[in-house]
Image: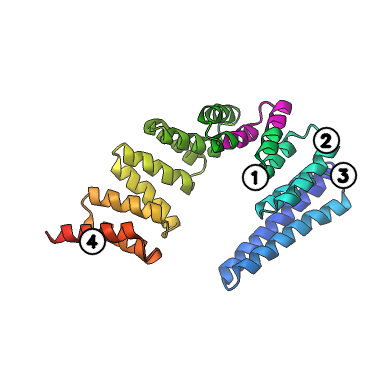
């Protein structure tokens, strides 16, 4: 093992240990989660910087540092780290993609697109950059180019669950619900607890009249986040269709416990209780 790889491995192990310690702390005490998160962030970043102090030419560590900054929305610092990589290695296609993501999240879309294009010019088989560029195209409502990039992202990495998920959402917007379900199926097969894909798949199941399938997905979503109002509304609608009135009432009441002045939930609750008395 080379010295660079050894240093990088040690740094990653430190980060993983920090994550475990942070999780244990959160389980033991919920008194100050913001402080714990900040403490974990500083520890992780300092660990990488410490490794860089001993191996300042290790570009993999700069990429790791940039990704860590991005985890905590420090996009300017992330860009600085990726710039260091690119100044030393202009062919670092991963750094171009990550820097493009940081620019995108800062709202500098033109520079983001330029970086995604450069990443793919260097490595036309890089799935992540196709996915990143698809997000840009989707953001400017160019679904055709977005779908083309998502097809390429999946072609070069058929385990890219985010690409399947995004492609399913675009197909869903065009009411191609059967095709959308298939993409969400693939996404969930790669990441079984993918709550986002489960939620969107439930929408397509609902539109296809597959109510029991939709209900199963929504139950999983709401087990993960019981206060997710859009999912509660859809589940209540499905429960009404399945004549499970009491359960639907509970969902509307749950919505009102989360959003006291939700006019739609108030109206639906009045209607369903009135219908129940008839």
Q: Which residue is mark 2?
A: 89
Closer to the camera: disc 4 or disc 3? 4
Q: Which residue is mark 1?
A: 107
Give how far across and how far down residue 171 sits, in percent.
44, 32
Residue 217 place in picture, x, y as percent: 38, 47
Q: Could you tell me which secondary element the residue under label 4 belongs to?
A: helix
Answer left or right for 232 relative to 185.
left
The alpha-carbon separation of the residues under discs 4 and 3 comes to: 67 Å
Range covered by the magenta-colored residues = 117-135
Q: Are the residues flagged by discs 2 and 3 in contact, CB closer than 8 Å? A: no
Q: Earlier along the polypeptide chain: callout 3 or callout 1? A: 3
Label 3 to label 1: alpha-carbon separation: 30 Å
- Residues at discs 1 and 2 in contact (Cβ within 8 Å): no
Question: Could you classify mark 1 by the number of other residues whose Cα lies within 10 Å: few (under 14), some (14-19), or many (20 or more)?
Answer: few
Q: Residue at x 38, y 33 (%)?
A: 175
* Image quadrant assignment for residue 184: top left
- Element type where label 2 sits in the image: loop
Label 3 sits on residue: 57
The numbered mark, 4 or 2, whose residue comes first in the sequence reads: 2
> Looking at the image, can residue 68 be seen?
no
Q: Secondary structure at mark 1?
A: loop
């Amino acid at each position: 093992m080379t010295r660079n790889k050894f240093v990088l491995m040690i740094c990653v192990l430190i980060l993983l240990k920090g994550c475990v310690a942070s999780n244990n702390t959160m389980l033991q005490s919920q008194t100050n989660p913001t402080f714990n998160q900040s403490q974990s962030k500083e520890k992780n970043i300092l660990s990488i910087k410490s490794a860089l102090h001993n191996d300042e030419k290790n570009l993999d560590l700069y990429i790791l540092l940039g990704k860590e900054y991005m985890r905590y929305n420090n996009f300017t610092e992330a860009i600085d780290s990726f710039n260091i990589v690119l100044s030393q290695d202009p062919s670092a296609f991963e750094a171009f993609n990550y820097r493009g993501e940081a620019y995108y999240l800062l709202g500098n879309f033109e520079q983001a697109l330029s970086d995604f294009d450069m990443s793919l010019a260097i490595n036309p088989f890089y799935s992540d950059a196709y996915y990143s560029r698809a997000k840009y195209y989707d953001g400017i409502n160019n679904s055709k180019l977005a779908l083309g990039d998502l097809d390429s992202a999946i072609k070069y990495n058929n385990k890219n669950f985010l690409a399947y998920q995004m492609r399913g959402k675009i197909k869903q917007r065009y009411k191609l619900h059967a095709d959308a379900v298939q993409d969400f199926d693939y996404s969930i097969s790669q990441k079984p607890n993918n709550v986002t894909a489960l939620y969107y798949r439930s929408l397509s199941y609902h539109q296809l009249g597959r109510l029991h399938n939709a209900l199963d997905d929504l139950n999983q979503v709401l087990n993960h986040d019981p206060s997710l109002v859009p999912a509660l509304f859809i589940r209540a609608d499905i429960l009404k269709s399945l004549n499970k009135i009491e359960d639907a009432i509970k969902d509307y009441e749950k919505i009102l416990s989360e959003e006291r002045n939700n006019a739609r939930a108030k109206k639906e609750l009045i209607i369903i209780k009135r219908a129940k008395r008839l």
